[in-house]
């Protein structure tokens, strides 16, 4: 008697996930799309990946496993060929003798499973989970340290001849199959940096050799052992080829960019090459626009870490009909992200919002975004003039760098527009000096100014390895903290674990210093009162300075003593 396997639609109906009517509707759609039932249902949002995986498990008689909070078995991963789990989209769970238990999302891919059994010389026992869970777990845990080690070992064995092909596609197969260790090193470094959430890769030439560092959550750390100095030139040449720069020019700085494809994602890399006494150094900035777009979906002031009191004050100011909202801080302090969080809270259907940026890092629905192009003559000042002819309600200027842009931004704020912008300064009072130095009339400037917000990003303790620590009074005093205030208060640090790559920190949170302008403060600024008087007045008006905002995070157990002293001054 022939065994009839139950259809996936019927199983989902039995599970109570969809109705019979929805099954009929999906069957009609899949005839047009040519896709299978599962893909069509996921596209239509009829069921989730987890529900589909559970139904597939029932259909084929395999157990469903939830890997949401699982950690990869490092030994089991190391026993498999590098890149195999990612290439075949599977998670090894356990091995008993000649049987390897793996979690897969598609048990119907018989050809892949048969090939795998032959390649490994093992029989496979299957469990079912969703594709997204597999990808997230591999992204979080696998990395490519082994490929990096193998590439570094090759360096010790042979001198490399360049095979610069400038290939754009970065895939795991390429990492493991490419014959040139230089190409493998660069590609696996890019891949590893993405896995570790790095924002920049620094390749530094030193007297000892080449050092590769990653910047994660705003802090640099060394990613690999020092590589022999002989390979400095081939490494930089490879990066130049990828960025379409001049290989023969080694005495002047060069800037370029390249794009790679990793799976379904397209990632931009901006490259800066600079000559030093030991050779050339490279810094590669990673712009993962698709990850940024995913983060933007839920971007709010709460997500950025703003305290409730500051959130309410900021929201009041960004809803005013005209004026200027200024955000200040050093490079990489999250100024643009904060402005986008503010813009995302304004209803773009009722108001025309236009931004001019260099470059456009986030793409926001309902907002008109203009990229600066200085080579073609589109500067901030020129773009801003043009924007004003497009009848905007709210304008965001990525950064004020010159007197001309500052002048137009101030005029725009005085003539009925709400202008959001950033400027490089250390605190809210330094901003006032910056604008005066640009030749802006003090009275016009303070008249249009609604508020100034200074911002920093402070690293958060990893929740997976967070533990309590104790400080004595002397240690607290040395750290610029009042021992009486911290008496009996628990303080925490991160021990370092797999989840945070041994750093003890995971992610960052914003601390802000918000100065709201009123007539009394405006008068004091125009009359050039000393900063000490302005600070006292700001405190009375409710401004919390950066140091106090950092201490609030410390007392809440979100960050460490070392981190608040790295980001803020004790005398603030």
Image (cartoon, grey):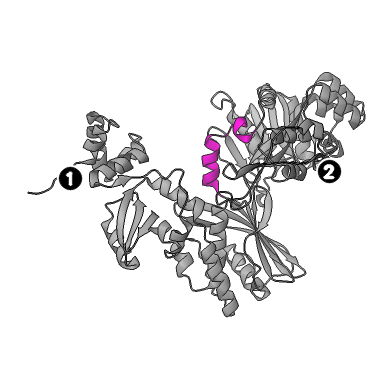
Quarter residue 319 falls in: top right
Residue that extends furthest to the left in the rendered view of this protein? 1
Q: Nearer the viewer, residue 373 or 236?
A: 236
For residue 298: magenta? yes
Residue ID for mark 2: 478
290 or 535, which is in the foreground?
Answer: 535
Helix, strand or loop for the magenta stretch, by majority: helix
Rendered residue at 59%/34% (across/down): 303
What's the residue at 28%, 47% (across, down)? 62
Q: Please tell me which of labels 1 and 2 falls first in the chain.
A: 1
Q: In percent of the image, x 71 and y 70: which residue is there? A: 250
Q: Position of residue 278 (x, y in %)?
A: 75, 70
Q: Position of residue 181 (x, y in %)?
A: 54, 72
Residue topped by disc 1 = 5
Whether residue 25 is visible here, answered yes or no, is no
When asked about the image quadrant of residue 517, the answer is top right
- Quadrant where the C terminus is found in the figure: top right
Q: Which residues are magenta?
A: 288-305
């Amino acid at each position: 008697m022939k065994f009839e396997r139950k259809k996936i639609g019927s199983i989902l109906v039995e599970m109570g996930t969809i109705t019979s009517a929805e099954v009929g509707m999906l069957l009609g759609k899949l005839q047009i799309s040519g896709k299978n039932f599962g893909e069509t249902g996921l596209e239509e949002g009829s069921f989730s990946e987890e529900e589909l995986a559970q139904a597939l498990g029932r259909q084929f008689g395999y157990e469903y496993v939830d890997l949401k909070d699982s950690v990869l078995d490092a030994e089991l991963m190391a026993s498999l060929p590098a890149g195999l789990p990612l290439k075949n989209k599977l998670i090894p769970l356990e091995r008993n003798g000649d049987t390897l238990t793996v979690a897969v999302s598609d048990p119907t891919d018989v050809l892949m499973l048969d090939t795998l059994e032959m390649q490994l010389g093992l029989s496979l026992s299957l469990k079912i989970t969703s594709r997204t869970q597999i990808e997230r777990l591999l992204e979080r845990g696998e990395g490519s340290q082994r490929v990096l080690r193998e590439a570094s070992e090759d360096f010790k064995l042979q001198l490399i001849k360049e095979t610069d092909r400038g290939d754009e596609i970065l895939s795991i197969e390429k990492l493991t199959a490419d014959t040139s260790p230089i190409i493998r090193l660069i590609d696996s470094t890019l891949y590893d940096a993405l896995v570790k959430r790095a924002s920049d890769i620094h390749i530094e030439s030193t007297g000892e050799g080449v050092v590769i560092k990653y910047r994660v959550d705003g802090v640099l750390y060394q990613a690999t052992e020092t590589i022999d100095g002989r390979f400095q030139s081939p490494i930089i040449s490879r990066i130049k080829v990828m960025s379409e720069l001049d290989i023969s020019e080694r005495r002047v700085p060069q800037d370029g960019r390249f794009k790679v494809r990793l799976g379904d994602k397209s990632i931009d890399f901006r490259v800066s090459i600079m000559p030093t006494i030991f050779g050339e150094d490279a810094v590669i900035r990673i712009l993962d626009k698709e990850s940024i777009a995913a983060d933007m979906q839920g971007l709010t002031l709460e997500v950025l870490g703003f305290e409730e009191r500051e959130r309410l004050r900021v929201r009041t100011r960004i809803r005013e009909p005209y004026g200027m909202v200024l955000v200040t801080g050093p490079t990489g302090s999250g100024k643009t992200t904060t402005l986008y969080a503010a813009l995302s809270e304004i209803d773009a259907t009722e108001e025309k919002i236009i931004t001019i940026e260099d470059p456009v890092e986030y793409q926001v629905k309902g907002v008109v975004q203009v990229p600066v192009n200085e080579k073609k003559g589109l500067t901030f000042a020129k773009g801003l003039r043009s924007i004003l002819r497009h009848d905007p309600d709210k304008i965001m200027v990525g950064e004020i760098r010159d007197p001309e842009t500052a002048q137009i931004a101030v005029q725009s704020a005085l003539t009925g527009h709400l202008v959001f912008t950033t400027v490089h300064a250390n605190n809210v009072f330094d901003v006032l000096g910056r604008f005066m130095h640009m030749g802006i009339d003090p009275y016009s400037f303070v008249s249009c100014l609604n508020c100034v917000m200074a911002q920093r990003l402070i690293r958060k303790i990893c929740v997976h390895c967070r533990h309590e620590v104790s400080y004595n009074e002397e240690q607290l005093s040395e750290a610029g903290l009042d021992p009486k205030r911290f008496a009996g208060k628990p303080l925490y640090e991160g021990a370092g674990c797999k989840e945070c790559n041994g750093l003890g920190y995971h992610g960052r949170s914003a601390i802000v210093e918000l100065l709201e302008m009123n007539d009394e403060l405006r008068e004091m600024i125009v009359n050039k009162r000393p900063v000490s008087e302005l600070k006292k007045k700001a405190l009375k008006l409710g401004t919390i300075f950066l140091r106090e905002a950092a201490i609030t995070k410390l007392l809440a157990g979100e960050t460490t003593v070392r981190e608040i002293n790295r980001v803020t001054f004790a005398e603030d």
